[in-house]
Image (cartoon, grey):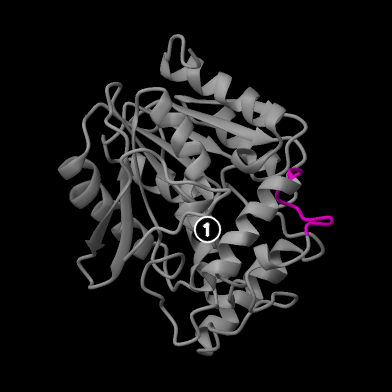
Amino acid sequence: MELYPTLENRLPPQAEVIPLKTSDGFALRGMKCGTGERGTILLLTGRSDYMERYFETMRELVQRGFCVASFDWRGQGGSQRLLKDGLRGHIGNFRFFDEDLRTAMNQLVRSHCPGPYYALAHSTGGHILLRNILRETWFSKAILTAPLIELNYHLWPRWMARFLSYVMAQARFSWILLPGMRREPFMARDYSDNPLTLSEKRWERDQATLRSHPSLGLGGATFGWLNAVMDSISSIHGSKWPKGPKCPVLMVLAGRDRVVDNAAAQDFARQVPGVSLVYIQDSLHEILMERDVIREEFLAGLDSYLGVADAAS
């Protein structure tokens, strides 16, 4: 297992690969960087991500005195794929992602990184984190960027998405791509009118990584993934959160998000103790890949929330 920097996307300091193995036998690509005078931030990526996309953010966190740990979820990036066609974004149950997170905590964070521990999780990574911090006391604080509390179903009524995904899973056609989804990685497409970022330079940077290392890419999601994520969404909303999660949570929502449902995140923050919420109004879904002014706004909030003094000096 390797890391794949480019001229436009250099490695963060003291970066090293740490291979991980889940209890059910999946090989995950993990990494750590920095020395961690302030502790460690576990960075959890989103669906179809790979860790190279976060090298810039990792460098900024290391500059602030943190060790940064991360890994690729099973089925994507440099980790072991689930289907023979490795470009299909698939999962049968989000409990498998829970196992990935437990593995990373035990074999990467606790074994190689100094405390205290914080989490920074994007989109689907934030969803998986929420599944776990209802019961686990791993982190002192957590920050979720554009968390997946509910999908934006666009033209599909939710009941139709639920019905079709369930029927396809029961009929053992869960491996089929959702309508409108393509096999090629989303980042391989043109920048024009993409729903993820307004930063063309960061879009082009990530495209360059995929051109050099296409094995990192992941295409569209399957009916199985949709069925699994809708099951997981129902379980989160059905969970009892009388005292909230086991650590304070800050949700940072993207005001122009077209991928996840911000209204559902607002409702969640109102109902669950220990969860606070802020908006970055001009951002699309991927706040950490956005224009400089948006990223600077986010990093200022991170500094305040984590108590980082004179971070930029």
At 84% from the left edge and 55% from the top edge, which residue is drawn?
193
Which x, y percent locates residue 220?
Answer: 63, 72
Task: Using a 10 Å C-alpha cutoff, classify the residue at mark 1 as few (fewer than 14 neighbours), some (14 to 19) or many (20 or more).
Answer: many
Does the magenta segment cover residue 70? no
Which x, y percent locates residue 74?
Answer: 38, 66
Return the residue at label 1.
49
Left or right? Give the position of 46 relative to 73.
right
Residue type marked 1? Asp
Left or right? Give the position of 173 relative to 42.
right
The one of 102 and 199 positioned closer to us in this rendering:
199
Write down the region rendered in magenta. 191-199
The one of 80 and 146 positioned closer to us in this rendering:
80
Q: Quadrant of residue 140?
A: top left
At 29% from the left edge and 59% from the top edge, which residue is drawn?
99
Which x, y percent locates residue 210?
Answer: 58, 65
- From this view, report whether residue 226 is shown above or below residue 177: above
At 64% from the left edge and 45% from the top edge, which residue is drawn?
286
The secondary structure that dominates the magenta segment is: loop
The one of 235 and 144 positioned closer to us in this rendering:
144
Which x, y percent locates residue 284?
Answer: 73, 42
- From this view, report whether residue 212 is shown above or below residue 278: below
- Residue that lies at the very extreme toward the top in this rendered image: 309
For label 1, the SS is loop
Q: Quadrant of residue 188?
A: bottom right
Left or right? Give the position of 259 relative to 119.
right
- From this view, report whether residue 255 is shown above or below residue 277: below
